[in-house]
Image: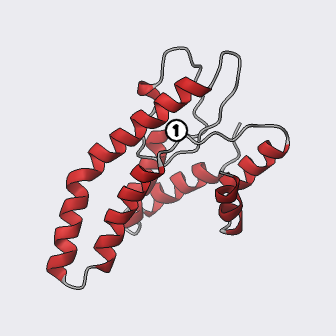
Amino acid sequence: GQRIVEEGIKAGSKNYEVIDDLVKRGAILVQTEDFAMAKEERDRIVKITQAKTIIGKLIAYLKYRLTKDRLLNKRDNYIAKKIDETLNHGETGILFLGAYHDIIPKLSKNFQITEVKEVKKIRDYQRLLLHYRKNKQKFEELAKYLVSPVT
């Protein structure tokens, strides 16, 4: 866990800097991800980029598209179960996730959840990445929101 945090900091991740600071102040780092499942998703993406032919890329892409939602759901279930098992009453947890995870409905009802940034806005921003020129104003509005201080 800590090695991954250190690698993330070296890569420039602000999330990992926050985690490192919290650990230094006494927070406990808990592995909530099943690395085999995360690796499976990564490997499917790598196969797309490493395919030698257009047909090979298309086949790898289709395989990825056919399995990505099922795999993400499986990962989300694992993460939610891990949180339910490890976060005790009265404790505070912080979870950094990609925008397409959907953990909240999978958690037990005993948690008070505060989203730091609205998931819908993050997903909208990511969708607009491919269409920046057509939606420049909305994209920039969302970008400003994403980098604004958390209140």
Q: Measuring 74% from the left and 55% from the top, which residue is drawn there?
A: 17
Image position of 51 (left or right of 83)? left
Regarding mark 1 in the picture, which secondary structure is present there? loop
Where does the image place residue 30, in percent across and percent down from the top left? 64, 39
**What x and y, as percent, mark residue 149?**
71, 46
Q: Is residue 23 above or below residue 142?
A: above
Q: Residue at 74% across / 49% down in the picture?
A: 18
Point out residue 95 in the picture as x, y percentages from the top left corner. Answer: 59, 39
Please identify the quarter of the rendering in which residue 86 is found: top right
Q: Is residue 35 above or below residue 108?
A: below
121 relative to 7, above or below:
above
The one of 115 and 133 positioned closer to us in this rendering? 115
Identify the residue at horizontal 42%, vertical 63% (top origin): 129
Q: Quadrant of the C terminus?
A: top right
**Does residue 138 lie above or below 132 as drawn?**
above
Furthest residue to the front? 36
Please identify the quarter of the rendering in which residue 39 is found: bottom left
Front one among 85 and 15: 85
Residue at screen point 66% across, 15% down: 89
**Three-letter amino acid code at disc 1?**
Glu
Q: Residue 126 at x, y = what percent?
A: 43, 56
**Image quadrant in which you'd find residue 59:** bottom left
Q: How is the image coloured?
A: secondary structure
Q: Dot 1: few (<14), some (14–19), or many (≥20) neighbours within 10 Å? A: few
Q: Is residue 63 left or right of residue 40?
A: left
Left or right of residue 129: residue 88: right
Residue 17 in view of the camera:
yes
Q: Farthest residue in the bottom direction? A: 52
Give the residue pinned by disc 1: 118
Q: Is residue 61 left or right of residue 143?
A: left
